[in-house]
Structures are given as structure tokens and as C-alpha cells.
Amino acid sequence: MSSLAAVAEQLFQDIQKTFHETSLIPDDLLIALRFVFGSCALQALDLVDQRSVTCVSSPSGRKAFQVLGGSGKLYTCFISCHFCPCPAFAYTVLRRNESLLCKHILAAYLSQAMGVSRLEVLSDQQMSLILSGGAGPEP
């Protein structure tokens, strides 16, 4: 694991601990988020504030996050492999290697750490459809 990824992981743990105790993210952690993730940190926090993140799971244990982007498009993100189908992920993360994550994946991590993502249990068949790139449930 790269040192930056280790810092990010520790940051999520600190946010989880602090948020569960105070229901707030202190300024020092907000500054650290901005430092580690750049401009997408604010955008990700906005998505979390708007409750745009849904954790979908199935009885077989599969799990993914669906994030309703600012444009109204629904992105299915997989934090287990750090993947999002959005253009920003393809360009800034995969192609240019300028960022660790896009705002959608960061919003999924943050909402999970804060315990504020909506939860939806799907059938294994519905989850297979989502995982294969088919249509998922409406937001």
C-alpha cells in the first residue's frame, strides 16, 4: 500500500471515530481531506450532504455504492477495487494519475465512514444486473 493510500485510510478511520462521537467533521480533518484529495473533497462532501449515496447489497454478500452525481446520472462505484465509471475517474485517476479517487468514490468512502449512506438490499438477480452494467434501481 502506498503511503498516500495509508494516509487516506487513516483519515477515513479518524472521520469515522470523530463523526460518531460528535456528528461533525472537525476543521483539521476537513483540511486534511482537501490536502489529500484536492478539489474533489468538497464535491464529495456535497454529495454526502445531499444524501446521494446508497449502499446496495445482496444476500450473497455482494456490495456496491450507487452515487447520484450532480448531473443527475447514477454511478455504480466499487470501493473494493476503487472503480467508478465516471469520465473524471477515467481521466484523472486512470489516464493522468493525478488523483487517488473521483468525487463519487470519495463520497462512498465518506458516507460509509460517517454512517450516513442509504442502505438498500437487492436480490442476487438484481445485484447481478447492476454488476453486469445493466440498469439498477432508481435513486
Image (cartoon, grey):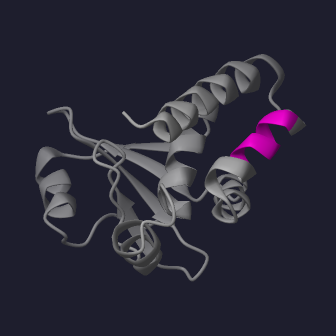
Q: Is residue 46 above or below residue 55?
A: below
Main SS class of the magenta portion in the image: helix
Residue 17, horizontal then vertical, whole percent: 68, 19
Residue 56, horizontal then vertical, whole percent: 35, 47
Residue 78, horizontal then vertical, whole percent: 32, 51
In the rendered structure, does residue 29 fall within the stretch colored magenta? yes
> Residue placed at 14% from the left, 33% from the top?
60
Say whether residue 25 is visible.
no
Residue 62, horizontal then vertical, whole percent: 21, 39
Q: Is residue 39 above or below residue 24?
A: below
Judge left or right: residue 81 versus residue 16: left
In the rendered structure, does residue 91 fall within the stretch colored magenta? no
**In the rendered structure, which segment of residues is drawn in magenta?**
28-33
> Residue placed at 58% from the left, 42% from the top?
111
Quadrant where the image shows the N terminus: top left
Residue lying furthest front in this view?
3
Q: Is residue 7 above or below residue 71?
A: above
